[in-house]
Amino acid sequence: IVANAALSFGRAYLNNYKNIIIAVIAAGMFGLKMNPVIVILSAALLGLMLYNKLSSPIITGQKGDTPSAKPFLLLLLASAIGFVLLFFVNHKVFSLAILMARIDLFAFGGGFASVPLMFHEIVEVRSWMDSSTFLNGIALGQVTPGPIVITSTFVGYLLYGPLGGIIATISMFLPSFLIVVGITPYFERLSASPYFNKAINGILSSFVGLLLTVTVRFALNIPWDIPRILLAAAAFAALLFKIDIIWVVLIGTAISAIIL
């Protein structure tokens, strides 16, 4: 599943040698266990430096009435109050909430972009769980409704029970929601900026390298044998042929229960 996500990102964004260079650099930096946030910011800087101009903007705006920024300010204030209250009520859950919000804040390009960030912070930095358990969370998230970032619910629940699961889920979606609400009044101006589009293009290219590195790390933590190799190859092939991921996971789970 993660390998297919890396391939999908690669097909979408590695359409010239500059994007490939950024992806390779990102993979190397993350392979050396550098903080993925630093990798992402470096990719944005490389995008600004390498691209003269883009053939078409990553984001295109549409003209229309400019909405008020008041809803964003009210939501931001309510979120800040919520985090402050959580800090005093349960500091450990507050730390989890801040971590999930930070992961979502840098997970550009879709849900799978959050996987390298979560893996780095939860498995490598904080050792809250091992890589096999984290893989279980990804698999469980794929057989339930919602995007892959629902893995945050799994992490929060394992750490702090139902409260942790709820807070982790809300915190994972909160930054994206606030950004959408906050950026709308300025969307047309921002989407027309060549600097913004260069930085975003660099960031999206870097996630190919990040996902590739995570794929390798997950693979190294699997006790490979013939049945597992065949199962992984079959799942990868099924996703290449556009079979819905829910069927890949369900059928893979059933086969695993029988032969592994």
Image (spheres, grey):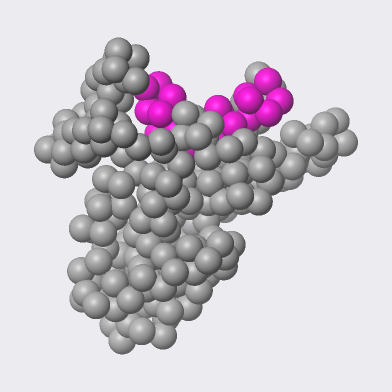
x, y percent for residue 143: 37, 22
Which residue is depicted at the point 36% across and 84% down? 50
In this rendered view, identify the residue nearer to me: 112 or 69: 112
The stretch drawn in magenta includes residue 253 = no
In this rendered view, identify the residue nearer to me: 211 or 48: 211
- Residue 56 visible within the image: yes
Q: Is residue 202 above or below residue 177?
A: below
x, y percent for residue 221: 46, 42
Which residue is depicted at the point 41% across and 73% down? 25
- Residue 202, image quadrant: bottom left
**Main SS type for the magenta part?**
helix
Seen in the image, is 175 located left or right of residue 21? right
Which residue is depicted at the point 41% across and 57% down? 213
- Residue 247, image quadrant: top left
- Give the residue at the far left of this rendering: 241
Which residue is depicted at the point 48% across and 78% down? 45
- Residue 175 visible within the image: no
Q: Quadrant of the N terminus?
A: top left
Seen in the image, is 62 located left or right of residue 175? left
- Give the residue at the far right of this rendering: 88
Q: Which residues are magenta?
A: 138-161
In this rendered view, identify the residue nearer to me: 81 or 99: 99
x, y percent for residue 260: 34, 20
Q: Is residue 21 above or below residue 102?
A: below
In this rendered view, identify the residue nearer to me: 223 or 29: 223
- Residue 60, image quadrant: bottom left
Q: Is residue 78 above or below residue 187?
A: above
x, y percent for residue 63: 32, 60
